[in-house]
Image (tube, coloured by chain):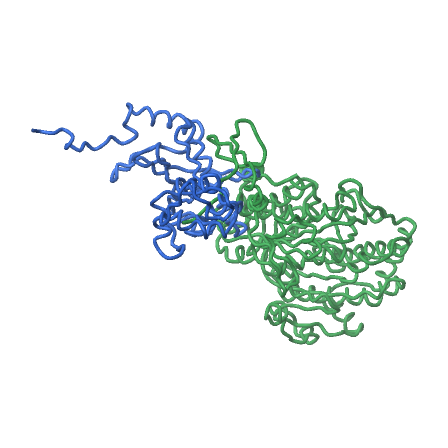
Chain colours: A blue, B green
Amino acid sequence: MFRQDHMRVRPKPWFERFGGRVLMAERVLVEEHYPDLAFRVEPDSGVMCLTGNFTLRADCGVSTEILVRIVFPIDYPDSEPVAYDAVGRFPLSDDRHIVAGGRFCLWLPPCSRWYKDDPKRLVRFLDEVTVFLERQLVYDVTGVWPGAQYKHGAEGYEEFMLSVLGGREDYLRIFVPVISGQEHPRRNSLCLCASGKKYKRCHAQAIEEIMVRVGRNTLYLLYKGPRLRNNAPTS
Amino acid sequence: MSWNYNTSLSRVQAHLDTMGEIEVEKLVRDADLHSLLSETCCRKIYGAHVYVDVPNFSDLATLTAEGEEYRRVIQGLHLYEREVARIVEDGSIFDGVRVHFQGAKLHALFFRPIDDSAEIAARAVLLQMVLRHFVRYIFNSEFPKLPSLSLSGGADLGSAIGTKNGHRGDRELLFLGAPANYAAKILTGVDDARVTEPLYEALPETLQSYFTATTDDRYNARVYELESIPIEDLEALLEEHGIKWDRAASQQRLKDDKATYPLNQIEYSDADVLIDIDSLGITNNKRVLAASGFGDVSGFTAYIDKAEDQDALKTALRVLHAIRKEMASVVKHDFDGVRVQYQGDRVQALFHLPKRDDEEIVKRAVDCAIGLQSSMELVIKKLLPEAAELAMAVGVSAGETLVSKLGTHGHRDRICVGDSVEEAARHQEGSSGGEIAIPTDVHSHLDEALQKLFVWNSNRGLYIGANITQEKVERARKAGLFEQTVFVTSSAAGAQVSSHATAGSRSFVPSRSYAG
């Protein structure tokens, strides 16, 4: 008997779903706040992009134009877009938080500011890109990244995990086997931190937060070796 | 009080729109250059440029104590310049052109008889001889209570473009080209007189014999130093060249001037409001704590010297006038400073407000230096792409400064005298295009973000800021902004990131960046 569920229908791209209403809503907001940017489907890949100049104005009236390309994932808005330096205006540099292909590392993935249910998510994302570009221009002048940053690569994730664990490096050492999935402490057993409390009332919540926010795949990449590696997973 | 891109852009564009067609011709007959030349009426003038400086006046204006001694310095400076102006300009004496005094430094031009290189060169040398004699034996004897003054001279021969700035009642002769430059460059600041090789080669043999060849290590150029000359020889040479300088008459004029302007009529005071130099004179002077700044168009002499045809020359002059006027506007309108003088392709500025507030005064001077760089890099080069190879070099220094005006025959030589003026000029002369050179005491008054944009140069003993423009300063000052809430506004005009809320701004704490 013919079974329909064996037929794999390629899903519609996000900008065609719901009669294109998602794209229309985003377009209205972009035209209002970033009118130099325009949506277009890249002919080769069929991927939707938002491209154009970000014009950054200094108080003295000098404007700096930076051509940016923002690529939308197929499952947008569930996943966040990715912004790129379209013409290599800035050098690729970890210190500038610009990596291969000119991709802007706006944040550590577990700390993403992407809120898919926020109707103004894209404008907020573009504002983050604006601030990121402004920081690039500050870096051009000072040679120092302005503002807070995580360390590069795996150390950045370690820094994040440490912050969840209250900055205690000893706790991180103790809980690495748990975080990496090699050990599974019982919730009612005593916590590994030797506090004398049950695990569920001590570190269970923090460890759970780390595992959810970092994600199983990333944790696997981070801990498949004997120690934290400096080659980071992609953000 | 700050530099603004749009204001600067409008100013330069308006000037370009109203600037008439520039005409450059060779000067082929005698003329009164003050009447002939204008912003658009320019002449290629073959002549000898002479600079004669009395370096002692800078020290005296800076270090002399308040009171009668200081009034004597002012009296000496004014009377020296009056008599020197007469010697240069009087038709029966040297019949030259007093371009202006740059403080105590005279810039004179000899171009008569037209294209007679030997006679022109001779006059340039004889002027140095006469002034040396005048200072040593006449001026010093009339002012025994001043330290013995010495004179430093330099002269070069060749063609330079003569033009004028365009303000009614505020017109100054400007000369552009190698001879106007090198004559000043070979000054040593000590008691000697020098000429360049082209001028020496043009001299009659009778005058060549008074020179010794040497090398100026600063420019690796051959120069000729004037030896001492007996008064009998000087008088014979003056007679031979038809120059009727009478030592006794010169001395008598100095005595008469001293009687006309006795010490008790010489006044000076500090300034509470912006100095109007044109209201000053021998009896009304200012002594202020001030920052001096010199902004020079680096590469302009080479730029104009290589302009081979009329069109290239016209283009170069159009560029110069656009830069020159904008430099003055930045000083006067953007930073409330005093535009003291144009000196060829450079502008001299003075900042003395708020009164005696050294920190605010030097901050303003450095902000203006950055404004000058911004106008050059962001506005002039945008509107005049042919200016791409030019750049601005700026020097700043601060200290006690005597401000006055030399008033003879309607010529308005605005003078600022003091060690800081000379230092600022030296800092600029030692800088490349795009640089701002400041001493340690100026650097220490700047805010931390701005301080970091200057790099210590141990060879020069100065802080050097390279390619600093206003928007870069703003960005350097924004470095601390990203730790706290920022406000973003965006529209068709562009986006702006600020530390404070504005209409329609959206706020958030910037994300903690990462690279992986």
Q: Can you say whether A19 is above or below B178 in the image?
A: above
B419 or B384: nearer the viewer? B419
Q: Residue furthest left?
A: A1
Res B28 visible:
no
Which residue does the image show at 59% across and 62% down from the upper left? B158
Which residue does the image show at 30% across and 25% down from the upper left? A20
Q: Is residue B14 left or right of residue B83?
A: left
Residue B263 locus on image (x, y percent)? 91, 52
Residue B208 locus on image (x, y percent)? 67, 74
Res B149 visible:
yes
Q: Is residue B379 left or right of residue B2?
A: left
Count of numbered tags = 0
B235 or B37: nearer the viewer? B37
Residue A148 locus on image (x, y percent)? 52, 45
Q: Quadrant of residue B104?
A: bottom right
Q: Quadrant of residue B65?
A: bottom right
Which residue does the image show at 79% across and 52% down from the upper left? B402
A41 or B306: nearer the viewer? A41
Q: Is residue B388 left or right of residue B274?
A: left
Quadrant location of the N terminus of chain B? top right
Q: Can you say whether B306 is above or below B332 in the image?
A: below
Residue B108 locus on image (x, y percent)? 69, 58
A46 or A14: nearer the viewer? A14
